[in-house]
Image (cartoon, grey):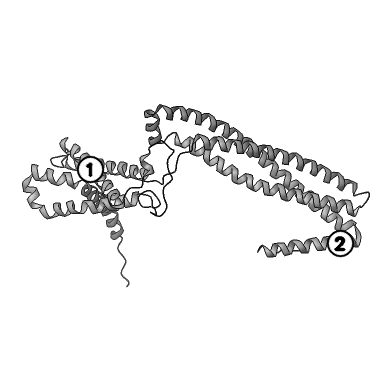
Amino acid sequence: MARRSSGCLPVLVLLLAPCFLGYAIGLPVLALASPALVPYLYLHDPAQFAEHRTFALSTLAAAPVLAFLLVRWASPAGGRLRGSRRRPLPTPPKGRFNPRARRPGLVRGYLGRIVLLLTATSAAALWLLLRSNDGRGPQAMQETLTLVGGVAGATVVVLFAIRRWDRPYIAPVTLATVRTQARQAEKALRRVRADNVRVERLVAEVSAKLAEAHTRTDFATLRTLHTESYGCADSVYAHYRSVQETLNTMTHTVRSVRMGRWQPTGAVIRAVHRGARTEAAQLRVATAGLATTVASLNAETARNRKLVDQLNVRTADVKHRIRDNCGAAGLRWFEDLEARREAARAAEGKPLRAAR
C-alpha cells in the first residue's frame, strides 16, 4: 500500500514561521543599533559580552554594510545622489540659496547618510536601553520587542527623509514664469474662441449647403465648400494640438507652485527672507489667475474639439454628396481625393483604410 503523506509538516512550518520571521527582521534591526548596543553590553554586562564577543563584534562590523544597502535602496535611482553625474542640476532663482540645488559627492554623500542612519538608530536604542528596556528580567520579551520596534521606527523615519531629500531637484517656478505663461494662456484663449466662432459659422454654412443640395447639385460650389471646410478643420486641429501642449505645461506649472508651498526648504526660506514672503504672496495671486485662465482654456478647447468633430462629419457628407450627385466629374474628383489621401497615409507609415 502507498504510504499516506503526513499533514504535520505544513502545520509545523506554520507554527515556526513567526519565529523565523522575527529573527529575519529583528537581527538586521538590532545590527543597525549595534554601535550603541555593543558598548552598552560591554559596560553593563561584561560576562555576557565575553560570552558573545565574536557575534557582537561581527554585528558591529556588519552595521555600516547594512546601512549602506538600506541607504542605496532608499535613495531614488535618478535622484541627487544616485543620478547621472553628466546632467547638471537646474540652478535655483538668483539670490536664493537652496541646499538641494547642489549635488553631493558620491563618497561623502553615502558616508553622511550612513552616519545619519546609524546615529539615529543608535540614539533610539540607547534611549530605550536607559529606560530599562534591556531585555532582561521577567518581561524580557516585551522589552526586546519594544527595543526592536523603536529602532525599526527610527530606521523608517530616516530612510523616508533620505528618499525625500534625494529626490531630483526641480527649480522652483518663478513669478516671471507664471506671468509669462498667463499672457500665453490669455492669447491662446482668444485664439481658441476665435477658432470656435469660425468653425461654428462653417458648420452652419456646410449644413445649409447640404440642405440646398437636396434640390440642386452644384459641383463647383460643393467642391469649394469641401476645400474650405477641410482646410479649416485641418488648421484648427493643428492649433488644438499645440494648445494641448501649452495646457499641459501650464497645468504642470500650477501644480508645481501649489505643491511647492508645502516644501520644507521653501518654508524655511520664506521664514528667513522677507522678500521671499512678498514674492510668494504675488506668486499665489498670479497662479490663481493662471489657474482660472487654464480652466477657461480647457473648457473652450473641449468645445473646440467637439466643433471640429462636427465639421469633419459635415465635410465627409459633402464629399459623399459630390460622389453620389455630381455625375462622372464628381465621381472622378472623389476617387482622386481618396487616392491622394491614401498616398499621404502610406508616406506617413499609417495603415491604409478600406475604400468607402
Kind of element beneath mark 2: helix
**Which residue reaches farthest bottom?**
1
Quadrant into which the C terminus falls = bottom right
Q: Label 1 crowding class (10 Å Cα cut-off): few <14, some 14-19, many 20+?
A: some
Q: Which residue is mark 1?
A: 119
- Comes first in the chain, label 2 or label 1: 1
**Which residue reaches farthest front?**
95
Residue 322 placement (x, y as % from top left): 86, 56
Amino acid type, mark 2: Leu
Amino acid type, mark 1: Thr
Q: Is residue 80 above or below residue 331?
A: above
Residue 300: quadrant of the picture: top right
345 falls in the magenta region: no
In this rendering, would 148 be left or right of 290? left
Q: Which mark is residue 220?
A: none
In this rendering, would 166 be left or right of 354? left
Query: Which residue range is magenta in the image?
Result: 82-94
Residue 143 placement (x, y as % from top left): 19, 40
